[in-house]
Image (cartoon, coloured by chain):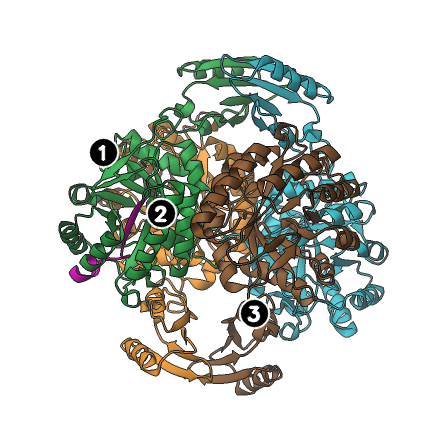
Chain colours: A brown, B cyan, C orange, D green
Amino acid sequence: MVVLVKPNAEESELQKIIKQLEKNELELTIMRGIECTAIGLIGDTSQIDAEQLMLNPIIERVMRVQEPYKKASRKFHPDRTIIKAGNAEIGKDKTFTVIAGPCSVESKEQIEEVALSVKNSGAKLMRGGAFKPRTSPYSFQGLELEGLELLKGAREKTGLPIVTEIMSPRMVEIFDRDVDIIQVGARNMQNFDLLKELGKTKKPILLKRGLSSTIEEWLMSAEYILAGGNPNVIFCERGIRTFETYTRNTLDLSAIPAIKKLSHLPVIVDPSHSAGMNWMVEPLSLAAMAVGADGLIVEVHNNPAKALCDGAQSLDMPQFADLMNKLKKMGNSLGINV
Amino acid sequence: MVVLVKPNAEESELQKIIKQLEKNELELTIMRGIECTAIGLIGDTSQIDAEQLMLNPIIERVMRVQEPYKKASRKFHPDRTIIKAGNAEIGKDKTFTVIAGPCSVESKEQIEEVALSVKNSGAKLMRGGAFKPRTSPYSFQGLELEGLELLKGAREKTGLPIVTEIMSPRMVEIFDRDVDIIQVGARNMQNFDLLKELGKTKKPILLKRGLSSTIEEWLMSAEYILAGGNPNVIFCERGIRTFETYTRNTLDLSAIPAIKKLSHLPVIVDPSHSAGMNWMVEPLSLAAMAVGADGLIVEVHNNPAKALCDGAQSLDMPQFADLMNKLKKMGNSLGINV
Amino acid sequence: MVVLVKPNAEESELQKIIKQLEKNELELTIMRGIECTAIGLIGDTSQIDAEQLMLNPIIERVMRVQEPYKKASRKFHPDRTIIKAGNAEIGKDKTFTVIAGPCSVESKEQIEEVALSVKNSGAKLMRGGAFKPRTSPYSFQGLELEGLELLKGAREKTGLPIVTEIMSPRMVEIFDRDVDIIQVGARNMQNFDLLKELGKTKKPILLKRGLSSTIEEWLMSAEYILAGGNPNVIFCERGIRTFETYTRNTLDLSAIPAIKKLSHLPVIVDPSHSAGMNWMVEPLSLAAMAVGADGLIVEVHNNPAKALCDGAQSLDMPQFADLMNKLKKMGNSLGINV
Amino acid sequence: MVVLVKPNAEESELQKIIKQLEKNELELTIMRGIECTAIGLIGDTSQIDAEQLMLNPIIERVMRVQEPYKKASRKFHPDRTIIKAGNAEIGKDKTFTVIAGPCSVESKEQIEEVALSVKNSGAKLMRGGAFKPRTSPYSFQGLELEGLELLKGAREKTGLPIVTEIMSPRMVEIFDRDVDIIQVGARNMQNFDLLKELGKTKKPILLKRGLSSTIEEWLMSAEYILAGGNPNVIFCERGIRTFETYTRNTLDLSAIPAIKKLSHLPVIVDPSHSAGMNWMVEPLSLAAMAVGADGLIVEVHNNPAKALCDGAQSLDMPQFADLMNKLKKMGNSLGINV
């Protein structure tokens, strides 16, 4: 971190800042020029609140060189984190894990049929929404606890671990007990109250990127969970909000190599929500593997035309089987197990 | 709402959709062309889930003519809603209400000194953060319940009602009891769990716009609160996330006339967080009045250089007094009471 | 400018960079820490190509402290630039200049009627498109040279100077001869070929902000014109592209105080194109004055329903007269001449 | 296209609009409901100016069903366009064409060394900037005509066709004579004057997507060239401007399947400019192939540390050779020739 001091700063004020900074366990270097002074800080600067520093009227600018996160950073944890759930090892080298299932859990028959089918096609975990974040209060909000029970039934039948979204800190205890991977949706990526509660568990957390969250903010949200004591976070890129309206969101595949470079945590891709159109799922899924993602979370339905939400973006079961075949074939050429 | 049916749709499928739509209390008109058929729906279409309709493979496109919200809509409620708190009447015609106070509550002396000062300058309510949403888990998170007590003390001394941010549905009961206006921060604008809980109270809710929320999504979040039974919502524009980095966010002042046209609910402006620089607060505040906002929420501090957060964006007390004088002067020329 | 050198850089490579930097007329200060070295550069760093520096593999990061523009910077030119055209003095303290006229020049009668009317209401210059940038090749492209002649006729009748858009470097000579202020549209803000040609004239240039241009890029485009020898640039904020679709673009009024702080050049606001809806023109115009703009460019038509383009965003002549009255009234309270 | 008429519209006004619309060669269907009337337009509606229609005060909304472009549309041209240059057939099924070369042409030795090297690695065309669009007037602007001569020399030596950027309509004649594919840069995507000039040639045009251009606007810019008589357009996705700052721009790979669905024209990807970091070029290039692009344009340098611009984003020659090997291997598994 480099702190630039204003040209006309008084020496006594400068000394106060230096004393304040010396309280942290950091190495300080003072650079004095004719018109300006800079202070270099070396060490774990993630504890420094840059905004607070900026309050001091003699400070011109604070520039971070290191990232403001530590536990999520690859610099401090060069070994990759592997998250295990059922047979899946998400984040393992040369391994591509596919999570699949319907947008919403709708009935026992539906979730069991889809779970069985995606398992047969090669999915390692199933997804399915029980609590649904909907823009309108008048839209279907999910089967809620009943949906959770249906997911548990499907898990019993198929052995597939459950990935499902949490919407309230009040549900953490139930999800910690019943669910295998807890999904935090894009709209809750900076619901810090929820993140703190999830940090108290040891359950793997699938942390979706917020619609307008920078990669750094996303890493900081993971840092909330890690700082709370839960080391099991999987990132999920699901598209960001841009001016483009042809796709529902703009899938930012550059975020995958970025996360792999900056963090030791796994990162997967959601090609269904980003595009919002099922015919785009296949090319985006292949691209996700090619760009280096650790896996996918894909919406699959037994009858998209009747889905209670987001049907237009779901694959049907044969389309999903076909996608898995293409992923396996491409994986072969790249030495990746699907 | 206009539903366009694909050119090659079978008549039997079309009849199924028509029957399904006739279940709602809406007037249907069928338009048949040589290549395409359209279905017009007239009435309260906010109950129709357009996404669900789009699932049907014979439907080409669904176009809303009316807004998907009803209780927040001015069409259904032509009279403006006025929210009362202390002496303030937010949303009253020709009235401009200013809320002011520190970013964070830091101490008894601080909050009382600032509250007294902003009251003397003409603020009608005080703000102050007790629970703070921070990007980093290592940044100061607020004095929490202790901060709430300090706010109550300052209210007792000054008579100014309290505006403060809630971060958890588990705090709704306490906030409903202790606070005068409950603020929902930008990051929680689509925390539907929290919105639903707030909809069960009758407390005025200051609903900040999400960083990447459209005006329609913002109205839909208000609809969540209104649909729950709480008619007291105040919108607060606080800047949106764009590519521009000179300002922290881009204050969207066009949203003010938009909200005034679309909704009967009041809308105020936060010039402090949007710009992130205190020298921009005055011009943006004057612009907020000129563009038709119902008021402001402004950060004011007794000593910005020592503030525990966001100091660079706070006005000090003399700067705030000066701002209030300019607002009163401009208000005079426009027939607006400050 | 601060150049951070990588921790493991070899001394010989560092010395090469230092030598390279010493070739510029800048004061260098070298800061050596245990793990990292920084080089401070003081002086006119606008000549330094930061991207080129970043090529050197031993450089970690280059951070600008000063702006990369000089001629457009207020630091180097504290006195404000005033652009004169006809009776107008754009950029003069406490002066608000209004430019008004139709989107497109359509006929002699139309442009003369509108010009006369806006003059009577208080506009100091007239606008009118002869060459029109249209997204579709099938849309009306303007009357072109014939439109320019009609503008000249209207100028003769009313005395109002002409503001009109140029689309090609091949037209610079004609525009320099015939037009009073040459407008560069948003889509051409980084048409560097055109900017260089305009820099060779002395004609005032109205430089619209690009749809996705940062404030810094906008200043750099002005720098192109200034560096070419033409000191007469007026900035025009006309809305930026964001995710919001309710308004055509998002008017960034924060850009006005930003430009006033960073540059000595005048800046005006286009409330017609940004919103794209005529009922928003009045509140945005009042806000533009309140936020400190030097003026407006407003679309006014004699019969919006028949306009060949953009009619829905134009005011009719009585609406414009009404707007001018409100601007004058508000100007009175702020000591601003309209 | 569906035109919605306002509920209270007078019959005589409605008849006027109908008459106006009947002048086009379109099939009209009138839908009358109790409160609202809609007019359906079937046929080639690309000639209809929706904005102009919206001017009519009795029209509530105009909704396009068909795209506003025709010559670029796949609906009207189901066969894919293949652009030939040298040995390359860009857009041919199961073919992936790589264009490679330095950001800027710097010297005879440099361009010839790089051209020879990328040819040996499998590139089918060479790129190299002679005229450079730079944000700052003080940055290196390219060797200009001298650079063009050096490119011609390198073509003679290697047989690789030249792809280089044009910045001015005044250069069209020279480029048409000397260059094999003319590149239109992102900043000039809506430089309509330039597009019109290029439409008069038969030369293949590489049309980069504008930084904030929607897919539809991009197609409309191609339509300008096609409407002028030049059918040879190649799209190039190079990243869009978003709030994310980690990458220079956000590569929108969803745009590739979108363009393939909407248009018959080829589309390639520029992984160098979008990310701005050379270590991201490989994963993004593989993703581009996987997502269905017709090829790549990649920056390659003989000595990135000394490049006069954009070095940090260039691959060196061995890195490029390595990339080509990976592309060939992955191409094999997908049946794609590189």
Residue ID at (50%, 24%): D56
Q: CA distance from mark 1 to mark 3?
A: 58 Å
Locate residue A137 relative to residue B244 in the image: left or right: right
Tell me the amino acid under the disc marked 3: His
Residue ID at (70%, 33%): A110
In percent of width and height, residue A258 lies at 49, 59
The residue that mark 3 highlights is: A77
Q: Which residues are magenta?
A: D97-111
Count the numbered circles shown. Answer: 3
Residue A54 is one of the magenta-drawn residues: no
Labels 2 and 3 in the same subunit? no
Tell me the amino acid under the disc marked 1: Lys
Q: Which mark is residue D186?
A: 2
Please give the chain letter of the residue carrying mark 2.
D
| Marked residue nearer the N-terminal end (2 or 1) | 2
Please give the chain letter of the residue carrying mark 1.
D
The residue that mark 1 highlights is: D200
Q: Badge 1, how many Cα within 10 Å: few under 14, some, many 20+?
A: some
Question: Please, is residue D213 above or below residue B182 in the view?
Answer: above
